[in-house]
Image (cartoon, rainbow, N blue to C red):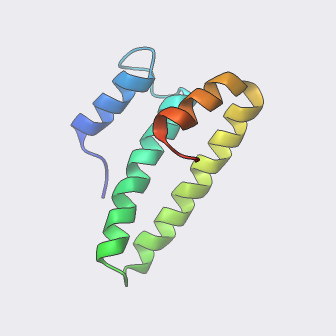
Amino acid sequence: MALTKDTTVAVIGKFGANERDTGNTKVQIALLTERIKQLTEHCKTFKKDKSASRSLIKLVGQRRSLLKYLQGSDLETYRALIKELGLRK
């Protein structure tokens, strides 16, 4: 279920200031988005996997709280990030 090392490095490289910038809010949101995409596909395939469904709900809530924080602290970065990740229409 976890992200592969290559995926994680690619996301950190794209959204972080450098390869060790994992604490940045943008990086955390991008990593959570990738994990949510994986779990969504898993839950579509295995409909009775309730632990994965619960994990998916927790991750979405965690991403929502990080997005709310980013929106309050830096609105322009928030808008650019949701556009780049394709989160809202």
Left or right: residue 68 versus residue 2 is right
Q: Quadrant of residue 46?
A: bottom left
- Up-down: is 28 above or below 80? below
77 or 6: nearer the viewer: 77
- Up-down: is 71 above or below 54? above
Residue drawn at the location 37% of the way across and 84% of the way down: 48
Residue drawn at the location 48% of the way across and 33% of the way down: 84
Query: Residue farthest to the right?
Result: 72
Query: Residue farthest to the bottom?
Result: 48
Q: Quadrant of the N terminus?
A: bottom left
Query: Residue farthest to the front?
Result: 89
32 or 79: nearer the viewer: 79
Residue drawn at the location 67% of the way across and 47% of the way down: 65
Residue 77: percent from the left, percent from the top? 62, 24
Residue 60: percent from the left, percent from the top? 55, 56
Residue 59: percent from the left, percent from the top? 52, 56
Left or right: residue 72 versus residue 11 is right
Residue drawn at the location 55% of the way across and 31% of the way down: 81
80 or 7: nearer the viewer: 80
